Image: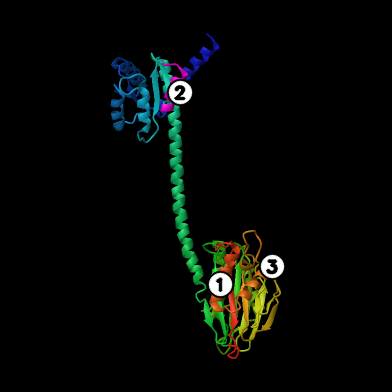
Amino acid sequence: MPASKGWKVQQILSDQKSLQSVQTEGQAIRTVLVVDDSRLQRRILASSLKKWGLDVHEAGSGIEALRLCKDVQPDLVLSDWMMPGMNGVEFCRAFRAMPRDSYGYFILLTSKSEKAEIAHGLDAGADDFLTKPVNAAELRARIAAGDRILRMERELTEKNRLVKSTLDELQAVYDSLDNDLIEAKKLQQSLVSERYRDFGSADVSLLLRSSGHVGGDLVGMFQAGPDCVGLYGIDVSGHGVSSALMTARLAGYLSATAPEQNLALYQLRGGGYAPRAPAETLEILNRLILGEMETEHYFTMLLAIADPSTGQVTMAQAGHPYPVLQRADGWIEMIGQGGLPVGLIEEAKYDQLTITMRPGDRLLVCSDGVIECSDPDGALLADEGLVRILRELRQTRGMACLESLIWKLAKFAGTDEFSDDISAALLEFKPSPIDG
């Protein structure tokens, strides 16, 4: 026996074994539709197919077969090519146009052997060809081959279904998380419940805008005794939920509504509260973060205590950007001494400085999201850009000044979606009536 014929016999035997295995393990081809205008040919084919455990349906024409396919979705179609009325190729094309839940394997039975004719059948949607008269062993092998293809198709369909199901579940989880983060953002914004307060001869305005749902920036103000006001800016390392939780904890340590919980205050013997030195407060926070809180986060901070009656402002800086002092005449300087962030080094010490502000002066404390805002080419705003903006906003005060700052940052960046949190606290001493 020639080697090529021996290989073909082995392949047929392998395909027969494959079909038998399919029938016992869960075959893809169960229902077969035989379409032939010859009743004898249909019966011959149907007899073999039924012996192999397949459910067989018969149709004498393409029209009859299409009507049958509306009720029965065959896994396999064996159709004669030459039939009166609608031939096999036309029926194949109409069969492919029908809506189906799964793919149907289509074998054309033909005596044609010309390549052009075979190409025409493939273009119409046929998957395979069998030459008439049909050899039973070859038919069985072709069915086994078709069964393998259908099983792969249905396995892929099932995997796609599982992927879609998983993606739907992930989307549901994401939507739930997104809703939770939206609520978390509302809660974080509520930490700055008061955005503006008039302290008599001075005003304080606050700005807090997260780059995502939640962020690590925090600003705040509090009454520091009968004559003083405290204000601060904080920027926790990192972004997201853990940083936001840290800001919530810090907001409690600097509470404006519960002075007994505010670490920047101490209780007087006769009642009431007075401000601690800002540097001392930073040292207390540093010990607390490193000693009692299990966290990898640290934060930069600037804490200032202002006395509106005297104009004295005492502040301590812990790695936060330098505050900007703008005098009433427009002159601007960056002040501060840098310092170490809170929560990095044990027993860290912090320096403080005192400045005197006069009517019409203002002090801006902002996070690095302001000075590190970049334009479309990647250039940073930097201190020089912030100074330029403040000069442009010299006549704009209070919340209007902070809102204009955001607008100018968006114009500089080319977008209002910033890559970092933006926060600022603005202390303004009111102009004297003469300057008015």
Q: Position of residue 232 (x, y in %)?
A: 60, 75
What is the C-alpha distance between the residues marked 2 and 1? 70 Å
Horizontal placement of 190 versus 290: left or right?
A: left
Q: Which residue is mark 2?
A: 119
Amino acid, disc 3? Ile
* Residue, far top: 1
Residue 104: x, y in percent? 39, 30
Residue 132 visible in the displayed image: yes
Position of 154 with respect to 198 (left or right) is: left
Q: Earlier in the sequence, mark 2 or mark 3?
A: 2
Q: Alpha-carbon distance for marks 2 and 3?
A: 78 Å
Q: Residue at x 65, y 69 (%)?
A: 385
Q: Which residue is mark 3?
A: 345
349 part of magenta stretch: no
Q: Check residue 113 for magenta coloring.
A: yes
Identified at 44% across, 53% down, the residue is 172
Which range is magenta?
A: 112-125
Mark 3 or 1: the one toward you: 1
* Whole-percent x, y for residue 157 in the image: 43, 37
For the C terminus, the image quarter is bottom right
Residue on which disc 1 sits? 404
Real-space Cα separation, disc 3 to disc 1, in angstroms = 37 Å
Tag 2: Cα neighbours inside 10 Å, few (<14), some, or many (≥20)?
A: few
Compare marks 3 and 1 and give the one earlier in the sequence: 3
In the depicted view, which residue is nearer to us: 224 or 133?
133
34 w.r.t. 101: above or below: above
**Label 3: element kind:** loop
Disc number lying in front (2 or 3): 2
Residue 6: give its label: none
Q: Main secondary structure of the magenta part?
A: helix
